[in-house]
Image (cartoon, coloured by chain):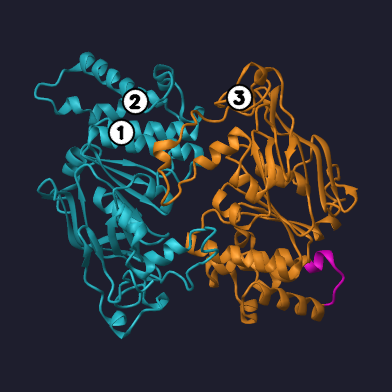
Chain colours: A orange, B cyan
Amino acid sequence: MNAPILEVRNLRKYFPVRNLWKRRIGWLKALDDVSFDVQPGEILGIVGESGCGKSTLGKTLMGIHTATQGQVVFQGRDIAKLRPHQSRDLRQHLQYCYQDPGASLDPRWTIRASLHEPLIVHTALKEPEREQRVREILAAVGLPATHLDLYPHEISGGQQRRVGLARILTLKPSVVILDEPTSGLDVSVQAVILKLFLSLQQQFGLTYLFVSHDLSVVRMICDRVAVMYLGRVVEIGETAKVFHSPRHPYTQSLLAAIPKIGGPRVTDTFSLEGEPPSPTSLPSGCRFRTRCPKAQAICAERDPALRADWPGQAAACHFAE
Amino acid sequence: MDADLITVRDLRVSFASDAGIARVLDGVQCGIRAGEIRGLVGESGCGKTTLARAILGILPRNAARIDSGTVMFGGRNLLDLPEDRLAAEVRGREIAYIPQDPSTAFNPVFTIGTQIADLMRWKSPLARAANPPSGRARREADLARVIELLRLVQLPNPEALLRKYPHEVSGGQRQRLMIAMALLPEPKLVIADEPTTALDVTVQAQILKLLKQLARERNVAVLFTTHDLGAAYEICDRITVMYAGQEVEEAPVSEFFDRPSHPYTRKLLDSLPSAETGLRGIPGEIPRLIDPPAGCRFNPRCERASDLCRTDRPPPEPVSPGHMVRCHHRLTEFSA
């Protein structure tokens, strides 16, 4: 194994919950002791249901939220506690891609102006060099150079998305955090966009953190996948292994809930009851125990740690086999 | 074969916009049988929501125009029915609606109980009874019905729930409430417009299971619009595919997935991420409805398209009993 490009160690992000008088009455534990490594060049999927903390994770890694506790080691330095102005040069190497990158374009700027801006902010490149870089990137995302003089409203939504991606890539980052990059897309368009992500990854040697709730997409493009439940990674491992033999009961339920065309109907077989409890009042011990079919007395007492008991796979469950 | 509960014939709806007139539905034919769960699938902009709303008579009045067509339901053409009779007799009574986003369907400043009581004041099945009880007796009977239905959709502690505000319950619970409210007036048809799109996959599985089970038990027909073919596979008896305002194929669920006959259906199935097919999208974009291609609207993206496809819309042709396709060059078993 190579040295990881990004190490996350015991990362916690708690949001205060306040009452009407602004007095703190509790904590919302959006991330509670999350640890994992990201290898250079891999695509790590982060999956889970809404409220599991997957978006908070992406934003905390970026420094959009400051971590409550823990470390994020990127290129040999801890970036979790950096103040916003200190992390500016970091942005060149670590980029965050919102759900619809096209929506972050300024409607009053031409595409050229939008693409030049990151280079003006972060680099000392001269105009002609910037222009050359911008044209390279635009070609890489599959858009003609004639688009440079257009405004965002003059191109289609799919093309705006590509421009947004180009904007992220102009700085040649090494890690890109993709936050729900395919939600809201039709399947026929989704496949095209996913292909684009893969080809850009090859071309620029990128590492992706692919945050998504869509398991079938994650299965297609991720090398490894981390499953989150209520602020905790409950299972992590190679995609093929996690999908083929999930160890954690939550992962098993999550996979069982995906409709499989041609297979048995999920509506006949699915058995998980209830919904996740509120992250402001977590159950004692294992946080999945309130819905877990395997739960026993020990689950209420001891919080299971992530056990790497299987080759290339780890799960946090007392009874995982 | 059962008679259709509702029959849509040659429905054309257009929307006026600054850029021109968009023909959002272009001669749609569709029949739903009593008690069947019918999937209406297609990508965004294909007209599935417009069709659902046209049936309910809730198209935006300032922009949408119904150019032609009929929607026959219980011997009446719903498109001819005056608004007050539609509201009093059909909408929310015989045809109920489950919206895509249950969080915006409630008024945030009233409790759930108040809002359901308000609904029952107008739409209670008791109001239609021969000699309806009045006043307090009616309210108590209605409340008992509501609580029974909330139990049926597996909401824990219904009495307490009625005193809560919409923001105090989760998305899955709100969608269960929506299903309960749709079923309260004992409708014959429920139009569910992308009811699980906003939900997580484990909650989606629970809601689909519930919807299917209740529709079967109560013999209610469901028109289930979705862009998620997996969800359609889960609960539908028959599936209609729409593309750019035209229906292109209609088939029983097993036929639909095993033997798609329209090139678009085939490509749509192939775009689903799967290990066998890899990542395959559909090249090109959905046509602009302001100036749509003539003939079959899929022709610019279709590799089988001929000159005929560019001039004439294909007529519906039967493939097998219950399986209809509109394509001049439909796929057969051997041409895959």
Residue nearest the viewer, comparing B37 with A277 = B37
Residue B317 relative to residue A218: left or right: left
Assess whether mark 2 and mark 3 are in contact (beta carbons under 8 angstroms). Answer: no
- Report the chain holding disc 1: B
Amino acid on which disc 3 is placed: Arg
- Determine which of the numbered discs, if any, sits on residue B152 in the image: 2
Placement of B290 over or under A31, stated as above or below: below
Placement of B192 over or under B290, stated as above or below: above
- Determine which of the numbered discs, if any, sits on residue A54 in the image: none
Residue nearest the viewer, comparing A219 with B326 = A219
Query: For residue A265, what is the image quadrant?
Result: top left
Amino acid on which disc 1 is placed: Leu
Which residue occupies 64% across, 16% down? A297
Which residue occupies 27% across, 76% down? B328
The boundaries of the magenta stretch are: A119-126
Percent x, y for residue A164? 65, 64
Residue A124 in magenta?
yes
Q: Nearer the viewer, mark 3 or mark 2?
A: 3
The quarter of the rendered structure image containing the C terminus of chain B is bottom left
Placement of B268 over or under A128, stated as above or below: above
Placement of B142 over or under B87, stated as above or below: above
Residue beneath label 3, please?
A289
Percent x, y for residue B149? 32, 25
Label 3 SS = loop
